[in-house]
Image (tube, helix red, strand yellow):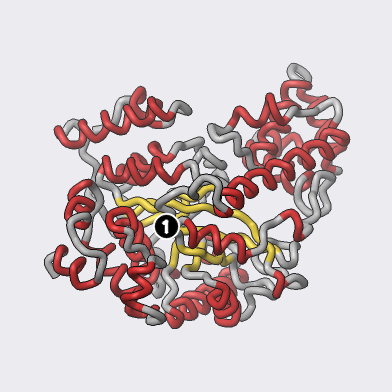
């Protein structure tokens, strides 16, 4: 039975109270049998962006949770650029709906040891996409961690404004105002580059409304492309906006902002933020073809020395490729990095991002190319869920003092323990109630699970 469209809309409301009420209504319908999701299958997406940064469908954390249930996912993880606004909601929604959920944050950092080396941000030496995975709390007010989190958002917004200023000067009379035309597009006032792309596309169509040929001529001149090519692009929103982004905002574009180290926090600062909020510092991996990622084992060892505890991979962009030779190379590099993570006992966080139209809702866990890695993906997801559950219930997270006392430097035992917890315990108030009654140690937790 499909949900009423009104309930779906309320799950996606920009009003948090309305979303909360919709979640309770959905939970009630599920409990009464008015709505029954399909059986759960062992597929998961731990890297889905929400509308607190950019989701290509405009989905809130609550709407994403519903979609995960409707797709039968075992685990859903949200990730947003530079903010943790989705974290409390996705964890509470997961508890209410009986869905295993994990929360995360993504940003970019500067890695001094690799200052001259391209890592995972194409064309930008020393800059790396980086994550915090398994977030279960927000920074304490007035702490260095809160200051870091606030600064992430400030840095991003300052870059956005600088980019808009440069592009406005070139696209006149197509000009956008950041405050009135971009900020309102996100509930958290946290626009991304893709919001800017949409805004410039929208404004150009408004300026040349009723004069499609002038719109074509305008973009033809700005893009230095034949009018017939631009006309075809304008009929396809996604390809056109990708062209706009490439021509105006990426390297070589008029709005491109050079990646000076001062514009990004040092990786060490991000790791400290993760430790302060009990989240696993997580290095993001692109595809293994850059100089910085060429030797996966060495790269991971460098980050582990700094305090990294997990690895993020977006599998779809490493195997679902049309060019056979590119696919061969990237699947081989995927195998290399998964083996390295396996040897180093790093849990994997995988997903499809959902911050670009056309990306799948979940990776194809039945794809033959992924068959050698699927159990690693599942093990990582269940480990991160186990960490999230224990951290919320009794403060026994992956990096907690209790876990340090229990496992020390034995990463293999730590991984096995949190995986077993995540594999066996379901979401919902029942698991939390059971765990809140036990002492924060391995034997007590296993005893409570009936092991």
- Placement of 38 over or under 400, stated as above or below: above
For disc 1, the neighbor class at 10 Å (few under 14, some 14 to 19, many from 20) is many
Q: Position of residue 209 (x, y in %)?
A: 74, 19
**Quadrant that contains the C terminus:** bottom left
Q: Give the percent coordinates (x, y) of residue 339.
A: 46, 80
Q: Quadrant of the N terminus?
A: top left
The answer to whether any part of residue 214 appears in the image is: yes
Q: Nearer the viewer, residue 124 or 408?
A: 408
> Horizontal and vertical percent for residue 354?
51, 47
Instruction: Give the answer, above or below, for where 195 lies relative to 108.
Output: above
Quick one: which residue is furthest to the front in this view?
142
Q: Residue at x 32, y 28 (%)?
A: 22
**Residue at mark 1:** 134
Q: Looking at the picture, how far across and down is residue 260, in whole percent?
A: 78, 58
The answer to whether residue 23 is above or below residue 43 is above
Q: Residue at the location (51% across, 61% down)? A: 314
Q: Quadrant of residue 378?
A: bottom left
In the picture provided, is 253 more to the left or to the right than 335? right
| Label 1 secondary element | loop
Residue farthest to the left?
A: 450
- On the question of residue 315 being in view, the answer is no
**305 or 94, nearer to the observer:** 305
Above or below residue 92? Residue 385 is: below
In which image quadrant can residue 400 be found?
A: bottom left
Closer-to-camera residue (387/178): 387
Number of on-image labels: 1
218 and 386: which is toward the camera? 386
| Residue 210 shown left or right of residue 105 in the figure | right
Q: Determine the residue positioned at 33% across, 69% down.
A: 402
């Amino acid at each position: 039975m499909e949900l009423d469209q009104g309930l779906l809309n309320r799950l996606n409301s920009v009003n948090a109270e309305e979303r909360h009420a919709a979640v309770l209504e959905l939970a009630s319908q599920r409990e009464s049998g008015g709505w029954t999701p399909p059986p759960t299958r062992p597929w998961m997406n731990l890297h889905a962006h929400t509308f607190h940064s950019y989701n290509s469908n405009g989905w809130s954390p609550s709407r994403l949770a519903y979609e995960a249930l409707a797709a039968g996912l075992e685990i859903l993880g949200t990730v947003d650029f530079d903010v943790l606004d989705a974290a409390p909601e996705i964890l509470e929604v997961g508890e209410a709906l009986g869905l295993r959920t994990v929360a995360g944050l993504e940003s970019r950092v500067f890695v001094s040891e690799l200052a001259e080396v391209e890592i995972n941000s194409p064309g930008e030496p020393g800059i790396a996409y980086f994550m915090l995975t398994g977030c279960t709390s927000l920074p304490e007010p007035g702490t260095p961690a809160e200051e870091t989190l606030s600064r992430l958002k400030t840095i991003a917004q300052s870059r956005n404004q600088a980019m808009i200023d440069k592009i406005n000067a070139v696209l006149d009379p197509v000009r956008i105002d950041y405050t009135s035309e971009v900020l309102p597009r996100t509930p958290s006032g946290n626009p991304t580059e893709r919001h800017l792309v949409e805004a410039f596309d929208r404004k150009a169509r408004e300026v040349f409304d009723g004069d499609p040929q002038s719109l074509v001529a305008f973009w033809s001149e700005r893009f230095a492309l034949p009018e017939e090519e631009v006309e075809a692009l304008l009929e396809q929103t996604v390809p056109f906006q990708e062209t706009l982004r490439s021509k105006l905002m990426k390297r070589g574009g008029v709005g491109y902002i050079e990646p000076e180290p001062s514009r990004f926090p040092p990786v060490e600062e991000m790791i400290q933020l993760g430790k302060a909020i009990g989240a696993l510092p997580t290095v993001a991996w692109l595809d293994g073809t850059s100089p910085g990622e060429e030797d996966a084992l060495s790269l991971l060892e460098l980050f582990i020395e700094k305090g990294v505890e997990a690895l993020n991979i977006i599998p779809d962009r490493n195997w679902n490729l049309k060019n056979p030779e590119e696919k061969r190379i990237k699947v081989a590099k995927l195998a290399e990095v998964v083996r390295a993570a396996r040897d180093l006992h790093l849990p994997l966080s995988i997903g499809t991002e959902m911050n670009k139209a056309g990306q799948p809702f979940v990776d194809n866990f039945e794809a033959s190319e992924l068959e050698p890695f699927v159990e690693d993906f599942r093990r990582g997801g269940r480990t991160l869920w186990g960490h999230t559950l224990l951290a919320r219930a009794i403060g026994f997270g992956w990096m907690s003092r209790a876990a340090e006392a229990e496992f020390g430097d034995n990463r293999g035992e730590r991984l096995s323990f949190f995986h077993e917890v995540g594999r066996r315990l379901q979401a919902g108030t029942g698991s939390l109630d059971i765990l809140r009654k036990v002492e924060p140690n391995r034997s007590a937790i296993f005893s409570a699970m009936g092991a």
